[in-house]
Structures are given as C-alpha cells and as structure tokens.
Amino acid sequence: MMATHSLNLLPKAFPPTLASSLRPNLLRFDSTRHRRSRRQNLSIRSVFTGIVEEMGHVKDLGLADHGGGGFDLKIGARVVLEDVKLGDSIAVNGTCLTVTHFDTEAFTVGLAPETLRKTSLEELERGSLVNLERALQPVSRMGGHVVQGHVDGTGVIVSMEAEGDSLWVKVRADKALLKYIVPKGFVAVDGTSLTVVDVSDGDSCFNFMLVAYTQLNVVIPTKKVGQKVNLEVDIMGKYVERLLLSMNNNTPQENKG
C-alpha cells in the first residue's frame, strides 16, 4: 500500500525528519543524466489534441514502492480505461505520463522528481479532479491542436470573472513562455486546448474564455485564484524561433575594412 499524502515536495503527512531527508532526493539535479534523458526524448512518441476526454479523480498518491524518490499517482477513471494497456501514454492535466498499472476502475502512473518540479501536479491531493486524454491515434480527429504533453512550465490564475454563462480566466506566465503566446493562437492549459483572447506583456498575463460546456468538462473552473495551471505553448512558435536563430547564425558576416 502507498502512504497517502499531498504531492507537495515536502509531504505534510511526513514527520520533519523524513521530510528533510526527502528534500535532497527530490531536488537533486544530475545534469549528465538530464542531458542523456533529453537526447532520448527528442523523438515524439505520443501526441494529444487538448480535447479533454473526461475528468478523473485522484484516488491515491504516495512514494513509489520501488523507491528512488519518485511518486505513484492512482487516478479513478472510466473513458480512458476502455482500451488501456500497460505502457500507454495518458495526459494528466496536460502532462504525458505512462500507465504502470490499471484495473477496471483506475490506473496508476509514475511521477519523477523532475515532473514535480516542472508541473503543478505537486498540488494534487486525494479527491482532486484532473483532466484526462489518451494519446492521439492515426484515425482520430484533430479537434484541438498538437499537444505533446511536455509541460513547459506553470502559470498562476490571477482572476476568474463570469460574463453571462461564460467564464473569463486570466493567467500570469513567465515572460520566457509568454513570448510564444499570441492573441487568437493556441495554448494548452492543464492539457485543455484553448484559444488565447488577449496577451498583456506589461503584467505578463494572457486570458481566455470558457463557454458553458467547457466549464462542465475540464478542471480549470474548479480551481481558485492563486492556484497553478500547467502550460504548454504551441510547438510551432518554438520551431519558427529555432529556424530563425539558425538562419541568423549561418548568415555570412560582412568583412569590415
């Protein structure tokens, strides 16, 4: 049985001595292993559309049985279990995770320390709702946009305001991410493909509107101002930036006499 607790990097249920012993294990950063891991992940194994299939709920969470500083996360679900297999990829709040165990009512995924550092999943508790989407199949319709499930970082909800039966949501993001977010462009927020309405460079924010149907089928409206959301920017912007940088670096420099 897993010891259940919040996924915060310093689990509240642990005594101070155990919590302090976990911190170095969770926050240690092996740059050699990280570089090797990034090389291995250059090929895209799974993609998503950002169209949430269902909301699951956290049933259990705790330290992984195999040790090593990771966590196991057990999620109750129905739709995504219909054809699940061991090793399948499922996006949980926009984070691509691998199924390590499943039964007729739930599935389990592993969370590495780097995943906790990069995403908002550390805020999950037993009973938390999460967005779920299975990886795209060749015959699937592309209802949203290409979402890799590779979270770029987190944003913070700064306001939520109703207008009729719609909901305006404003999110503050790091400027390094905001440069890829454009009005009328795509962004994945907690794995939900959304259209950006406005971008404010001055306060490093962007906003979007959720219609009534979307509000009932994704987790964003259940969150409160001040909570984190996972952000994945449109990959096309990164490709364009990389291409332009490469072109500039390859441009011959004029000889100055």
Image: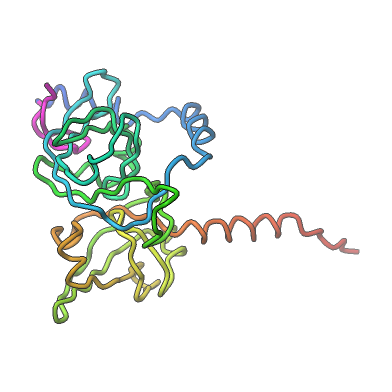
Look at the image and give the residue range highlighted in magenta: 1-14
Left/right placement of residue 185 relative to residue 32 reads: left
Q: Is residue 203 magenta?
A: no
Residue 62: % across, % down: 17, 29
Image: 32 above or below 147: above
Residue 21 sits in quarter: top left
The residue furthest top is: 66
- Which residue occupies the foreground of this view, 97 or 225? 97
For image coordinates 28% across by 36% down, the residue present is 84
Residue 72 visible, this orientation: yes
Visual colour scheme: rainbow
Total marks placed: 0
Residue 248: % across, % down: 70, 60
The residue furthest front is: 139
Q: Is residue 6 magenta?
A: yes
For image coordinates 56% across by 56% down, the residue present is 239
- Which residue occupies the foreground of this view, 247 or 135? 135
Q: Quadrant of the N terminus?
A: top left
The residue furthest bottom is: 164
Magenta segment main secondary structure: loop
Residue 225 visible, this orientation: no
